Structures are given as C-alpha cells and as structure tokens.
Amino acid sequence: MSRLADVIAARKAEGSGALIGYLPVGYPDLATSIEAAVALAENGVDALELGLPYSDPVMDGVVIQRATQAALAGGFKLRHGFDAVAAITARVDTPVLLMTYWNPVVQFGVDRFADELVGVGGAGLITPDLIPDEAAAWLEASDRTGLDRVFLAAPSSTDERLKQAVDQSRGFVYAVSTMGITGARSDVDSAARGLVSRLRAVGSTSACVGLGVSTPEQVREILDYADGAIVGSMLVKALADGGVDAVAAAATLLATGKGPVEGALGLPSSTVER
Amino acid sequence: MALRDELGPYFGEYGGRFVPESLIAALDELDAAYQTAKIDPVFQEELANLHKTYTGRPSIITEVPRFGEHAGGARIILKREDLNHTGSHKINNVLGQALVARRLGKTRLIAETGAGQHGVATATAAALFGMECVVYMGEVDTERQALNVARMRLLGATVIPVTTGSRTLKDAINDALRDWVANVDTTHYLLGTVAGPHPFPVMVRDFHKIIGEEARAQVLELTGALPDAVTACVGGGSNAMGIFHAFLDDPSVKLYGYEAAGDGHLTERHAATITRGRPGVLHGARSYLLQDDDGQTIESHSISAGLDYPGVGPEHAWLADTGRASYLPITDDEAMQALRLLSLTEGIIPAIESAHALAGTIKLGKELGKDATILVNLSGRGDKDMETAGKYFDILDAAALADEDAAAIRSGALGTGASE
C-alpha cells in the first residue's frame, strides 16, 4: 500500500530500522542536488526526503535556511522539484518524498501537485506547516493518488493530537525529537523516546525521529525504539563543505548506525547505550 | 449573525492555523487563557485601569477643518491614537497580551517589529511587568530605524537583527516563530498585528477594538450622527481592524483601508497586498499575500516600514471579498504630501503609516463632498519619521547633523571606549 512503509518494515524485519536522508533540491545547483540524493541512496540511505526551497521556512535552522536561500537565489522553480524526483527515481529504487511548506502546493493546486508527483514517481509529501486539521484537500488528493502523507508529531502534542497524526499519516509519522527547529544537536532529546512510546500507545507502527540527528550513534540510539531516523542538516553541511563525495561518505558513516551493535563501529559495546 | 461577532479561527475561507505541530499546544493554551480572560471582570478591570493610568485612554478625537478644506470640504475627524503612550495604537494590544502572558506564567516576551513601534511597545510592557524581552528586527530595518533600536535597548530589551531572507519584517516574524517553537514553555510570542495563526487575528483585533468603540461614541456625541466613512492605513491591519470593528454592523458607514503602494501599485515596488496579491498561506494563516507563481513570498516596498509587509490579516481579506470594506492603494508620495499637509494645516505630525490614511481621506473627501463626515484613525505620531521626512522634503540640514555626529565620535561619546 505504502512503498515507504514497506521499506521501513523491511529494515525492521532485519532487526534494524530505516535511515532517511534530507537534502534540498537545487542546492548548490539542480544537477548536483540530484547527484547528491542518488549518492545518499547508493550509500545506505533507505528513503529520501527532498526539500523544496521556500522563501519563509519557519521550521528550519540556519544550515538548511542558507542552502534553500542559495537555491532560490540560484533560480530554483517548483518545476525543478518534479524534475529532480524524476531524475532520481529513474536511477534508484529508493522511495522519494518531497518536504514542502504548504503555500507552494496551494498555489500549484493540490490535485495537480499530487498528479505531477505521481507522474514523476514520487512517494509522497512531508508537510511541516500543515496540520491534519487544515489538510482536507491534501487528504483527499493523497487518498485518490495513493501518495504517502507524513504529518508531524511533537512532544507538546496531546494524546488526542498524536492519535490524529498517526491515523492521518501514511508511510510514517514524523516524530519531532525536540521542541525546536532543524539543526544538528549533540544530544537528541530524551523527549524523543517518550514521544515514540506515546505514539505506539495510540497505534503507530511506523514512527521516524528527526530534528537534531547527525551521528551514527544517534541513529543507533533512535532505531532502538523507533522505526526510522531522519538526518538533514548534517548532510546539507557535508554537501556545502565537501560536495557529493562528502555526502556519500556521510551517508556511509550514518548507515553504520543501522548495523548490529557489537563492533559495528569498532567501538567497545559499553560505549553504546542500549 | 452580526459581523462584529466573528470569532475565528476562520473568516470566510481565511485564517486558520498553518504552523508546525509543535506550536499547536501553545496556541491552544493561549486561546484558552484568552477566552477565560475575556469574560473575567478582574482581567477587564486590570486592562481598563492600565489604559486609564498608563496608556492615556480614552484617546481624544480632533476635528481638522483646515485639513478638511483640502479634502473636498468634508468634515474630517481624527481619532488620536498618536497620543497614546509610546506614540501609536500598538500599546493597546501589547498591554492586553502581556497581561494574558502573565496569567499563563510566562516570563519572557518575544516580538517582531518593522518600524520598531511594536517592538518599542513590547519592550515597554516587558519593562512595566518585569519580564525579559527579545525583539526580532530585520537587519535592513535596524539600519533605517536606528533610533527605535536605541529606545528598545534603553527599555531593557535585546534587539536581534535578522540576517536571513529579505532581512525585513517578514523574516523577523519567521525568526520569532522559530524562537517560540524552541522556548514555548517560558515564552509568549507577542505578535503585533491581526495576522498569524488563530487566535492571534481575533485576539489582537479585540485588544484594538476599543479604538472604534470610543470613536463611535465620540463622533456620535460631537456630530449627533455616525460618520459616513471610516478610514485607516493597512499593513498587517491592526489599527484598521481596531477602528472598523465597532462600525461593521452599521451599514451606512463605509469602511476604507489604504494600502501602501510604494512607487505605485502597478510597479514592482509596493506593499499593496489586497490590491495586487492573491490568497495563499503565510505566517500561519490563509489570507491575501504578495507572491510569485510558485507561491514564494515577494518582498514588499514602502517608504513606511510599518506597512512594508507582503501579507495582511485574514479578517481584512474576508471584509474585502464580501465588499464590506474597500482597500485602495496610496503611493509613497501621496502619503508624504498628506503628512506635510496635516503638519502645515493642523500642527499635527502623523506617522508615515497614518499619512496613508490621510492621503486616502483627501481623495475620499473630494468624492463624498462637503456634507460628508469622515473618521480617520491617526494611528501613530511622526517623531520616528523625522529623518525620512527631512530627507524627503529636503529640509534636513544633513551637513549640520553629520558635524554633530563627527563631534560626538571625536569626543568619544559614541565610541566603545566611552564607558572605560
């Protein structure tokens, strides 16, 4: 039913979970952003989250803001988002989600956006500023087209709202690890563990944790209790600093966090919190 | 249902909550606290007392016949929000929200500001209530409104120049929202206009509706009748909603909002959101906004920093669609000429924002003729705009100012070494 849920379930069946990688379309340019996304898929990332640059990204920290602002200054158009999905899905089987603020979808037309996305082989949308309460048009379009729809769940959400997020999401629920915005953090909040357990209690079988995740150790810790870990800013920084090769290396390193605990990083097991 | 009774979250198809899930709990908490406060006589008395002893309410009305001669001879009456403490209508909303924040146990106020008027008002309330205050202000605006930055700092606020995006008001709102997401336990986001996610548009309107309620009674007392029209400038739209609200269900009273048209609403440089924009989602609500084909927000332009915003409150979008209020563009030059005219004919220097309402009123008066009575919301005073006006009319002795600055630097008064 959901390609994304299938991929996540498969990783879980292997005793691990999914690694989901974010990169913005059009940064540093369209061609390189496509190469970088393919590099993620070829180096252990199980699902791709492609960000559509937007003028007012309230959920993003400075690393992603700078990259998406540069993409817009470089001439990014919505059309390039669909072009990128088409180019990536032609080369790899990895499911590709678009992460987009809501206004670009509204202006494109919700139904038209869904149809285009299906046409280029996209898997669905992550909508950081669209709550299910306001999503009637998108719920309908995604049901009609079978696209996945990922809503956010926050530590501050009531149980009732968590249940709504779980019931209305398809593919996975995006568990926001901390009260804040995107950007690497040395500690992924313990709130994430509590949030995922609350999501389980209201029926979630597919919950992925994002915000602040940047190391294989954090990925491992998250996959211990959640179904997937989402990494963004760290990959964007790698791309900014070292290009596609650095992104590939970062993905490879992060993917070690999916492996069996003992000796995966050549670390004594005592350093790994279980 | 009376138009005055609209409570949100939607005004027709506008409004709502388009924000990250992380903020929903805070918005619900705020809404609940506001609903409780609204019907709590203790809260109402506290706010009324502050307005009486601190804001200086009720603000007076002033009839301006010499100005009216230039407006078709119509009878023009100004609602003097410029006489409020801190110099504009902004204090009405700020005191109300600060009281709600205090009831919620919040100890930190954050705000966005364009011209600095809302930032100054928020810093003032924070000082009054002993709260921490952080004001986000686009870097471009901190440069063109340096005096207001100094005012906020003097009042104990931290002013953070915003360096992302277009570095203006819309980006200051983005950064304030980011701060709020991360610090929502201790912090209240004191949004300064009738925009943003529910409950802000309705709550901010309610804190400003005192403007129209007072003015309606004052005009009735002075003239024995309701005015034929009520006018106000519209950026986000708080002063306009404040004065419109009491008249929404008086069908004989026409309502006019004047948007900033910058170089002209048919040029690329304007802030005429309803005139030139189309519906979309920005800063948490569905309303009109200036945007390109892809839905990317377009930067606005106006000589008035307070109207330099590419969005507008959702209730205005609804009033525009239903035809209850009309929204018309006023250029920079029309506003500046009206600013000078009111100064010369009546001895009142208005804010450039409010001068847009005056410029619109001149046109409207000529249309309606000498039998008409027009109530204008004079939302702020012009002291903050003296540098802009001085340069615009070439009456600023720039050389003397520069000499003064240079002398201050030579004597070390402005240098970092002054305190050592």
Image (cartoon, coloured by chain):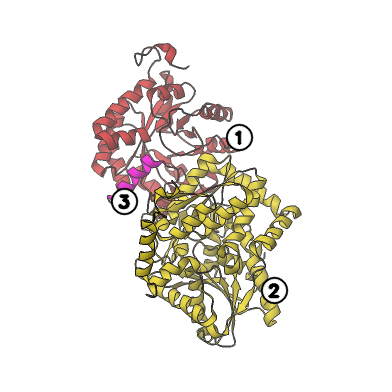
Q: How far apart in space, not on screen, are marks 2 and 1 (Cα)? A: 48 Å
Chain ID, mark 1: A
Residue type at tag 3? Lys
Q: Residue at x 47, y 44 (%)?
A: B178
Chain ID, mark 3: A
Give the colour in which the image draws chain A.
red
Name the residue beneath numbered marker 1: A159
Asked if residue A31 can be seen in this view, the reply is: yes
- Which one is earlier in the sequence, the residue at label 3 or at label 1? 3
Q: Pinpoint residue B312: horizontal percent, then vertical percent.
A: 49, 61
Residue type at tag 1? Asp
Q: Pinpoint residue B328: horizontal percent, then vertical percent.
A: 47, 72
Q: Quadrant of the N terminus of chain B?
A: bottom right
Name the residue beneath numbered marker 2: B217
What segment carries the magenta color? A56-75
Residue type at tag 2? Ala
Locate residue B94: give its quadrant: bottom right
Give the colour in which the image draws chain B.
yellow
Tell whether A87 sits left or right of A65.
Answer: left
Asked if residue A129 can be seen in this view, the reply is: no
Which of A93/B195 is in front?
B195
Magenta-drawn stretch contains A28: no
